[in-house]
Image: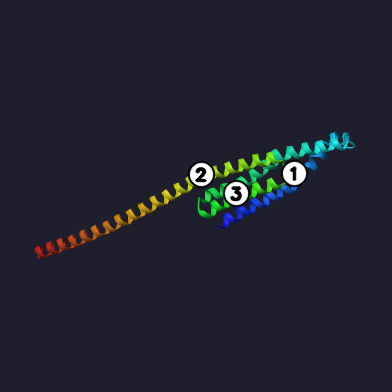
Amino acid sequence: TVTSIASVLMAALTAAMVHTHTDLWIHHSQQRDLSLVVNRVAGDEEAMAQLQTFLTNQFSSYQIWKNLLLRTGLEVLLLSYVGVYQSTVVAMILVSAVLCTIFSWSPLIPLWAAVKGSMVVVVVIVWVLLVGRLWTKSRRHSFLLERFFEEALKVAVNASRHADSILNHTLKNTMADAASDVE
């Protein structure tokens, strides 16, 4: 449960962080990568608006979702490894809801990019839930086999002790009979 809560909070914080840094990435891109272009079109408002739209689309459609999915992927895999329990399923649903909500509300991300990213998130969450279900089933099977073998070992040890006890009593009786015959 603690891992589930932590994963949901981390997904929300990561999504908020990526959302707030989008403007910084665009500004950095204008200064570092496109400084010559920005200087040439600085007086033309229409060209600057078009450049701003292009950069926003570039970052939102590729960079933002890639960074967020890579970051959130680790938390989702951790949840998957923990196993498919009620808290982890709820956490994965909340993670996908948080990611899809934050990016669909973001004014910097076009609607098509938010829908595309949301579909990717849903597909990844479903895939991870299936993988997590397999891991959980495998571990449960392993634990059941281990428990079965421990019970079988206890039965075998008890049977061995009982056989040793019978053998010891038989040996003592035989030795006593032999000792009485020798006398």
Residue 141 x/y as whole percent: 41, 48
Lower position in the chain sequence, tag 1 or tag 3:
3
> In the rendered image, which residue does mark 3 sit on?
75
Disc 1, disc 2: CB below 8 Å?
no
The colour scheme of the drawn protein is: rainbow
Can residue 62 be seen here? The reply is no
- Secondary structure, mark 3, is helix
Nearest to N terminus: mark 1 or mark 2: 1
Q: Quadrant of residue 63?
A: top right
| Amino acid type of the residue tagged 1 in the rendering | Leu
Q: Which residue is mark 1?
A: 108
Q: Nearer the viewer, residue 178 or 166?
A: 166
Picture quadrant where residue 25 is located: top right
**Is label 2 in a helix, a strand or a loop?**
helix
Q: Which residue is mark 2?
A: 130
**Residue visible at 87% across and 38% down in the picture:** 45
**Disc 2 crowd, CA 10 A, few/some/many (<14, 14-19, 20+):** some
Assign the N terminus to one quadrant of the image. bottom right
The residue lying toward the viewer, choosing from 51 and 165, is 51
User: Label 3: few (<14), some or many (≥20) within 10 Å?
Assistant: many
Q: Marks 1 and 2, Cα distance to the nearest angstrom?
A: 33 Å
Q: Amino acid at mark 2?
A: Leu
